Image (cartoon, helix red, strand yellow):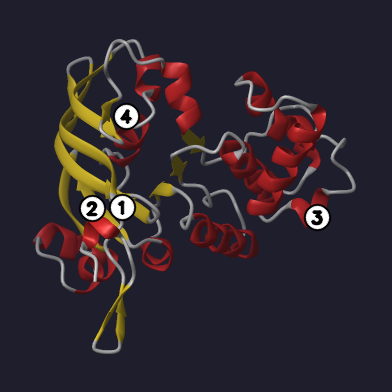
Amino acid sequence: MHGVAGMSVQQIEGATVRPLPTTKIIARDVNVHYGEKHALKAVDVDIPDCSVTSFIGPSGCGKSTFLRCINRMNDTIASCRVTGKIEIDGRDIYDKTLDVVQLRARVGMVFQKPNPFPKSIYENVAYAPRLHGMSRSKAELDQIVEASLEKAGLWGEVKDRLGDSGTGLSGGQQQRLCIARAISVNPDVILMDEPCSALDPIATARIEQLIDSLRQHFCIVIVTHSMQQAARVSQRTAFFHLGTLVEEGPTTDIFTSPKDKRTQDYITGRFG
């Protein structure tokens, strides 16, 4: 029988025990300032691979700010200053020698409002793989586009109209197209900032099913205002309040037996 390092499935007294997923992202003492405002305070968290981690908390609590630290999107804000350390697969992403363009290829982002490029469905997905030189022929690029749309649960709906504009799709389809675009370069991490808030309940259910299937291949971090969504899609949950990461742990534990009174008050609706 192997130890965890062997990563084999173990049989113990008839029960199948799977080793914990490896840690993908490590954050230590992460602080974010916007000018004089201290928006995120000393965040420490480990985020596992091949699973979904939800960030929950009231509006303005720092969860989206922290999400944007993971692909350095805060760099685009002149007044923003980030300190501390964030590592992905052991590499410090704030290392000055790191290529930020390559980082953002490795860390895909799906936004609150679907934002397909004003291009064809095909070009929306093909754009990044072509930019990063991931295909040597049109046939290879076709394969990447099909595989990405298939993984995003969209291929069956659009395979006969790949030349149509991506902006002509329904809201839910547009969001799945944005997910296909994010996974087309085979990233290590997918960040999702309120990916269902602009969608109806049926489209939301489709995206949630998709997130559940994608977690087998990717480390997914999702910011959500919906505690029900966090409970449905994530294996781990982190609760933020007033710029502080209050507590983080298995989703079931956070929702059934939170350690901190602030978490309990938020989950039971006493504030938020």
Quarter containing the N terminus: bottom left
x and y, in percent, of residue 39 in the image: 21, 29
Q: Nearer the viewer, residue 245 or 47?
A: 47
Of the two numbered discs 3 and 2 on the same chain, state the one appearing first in sequence: 3
Of the two numbered discs 3 and 4 on the same chain, state the one appearing first in sequence: 4
Marks 3/2: CA–CA distance: 37 Å
Of the two numbered discs 4 and 1 on the same chain, state the one appearing first in sequence: 1
Name the residue that disc number 4 marks: 69
Name the residue that disc number 1 marks: 56
Name the residue that disc number 2 marks: 239
Asked if residue 73 lies left or right of residue 202, the reply is left
Residue type at tag 4: Cys
Badge 1 vs badge 2, beta-carbon distance below 8 Å: yes
Name the residue that disc number 3 marks: 157
Dot 4: element? helix
Residue sitting at the far front: 1
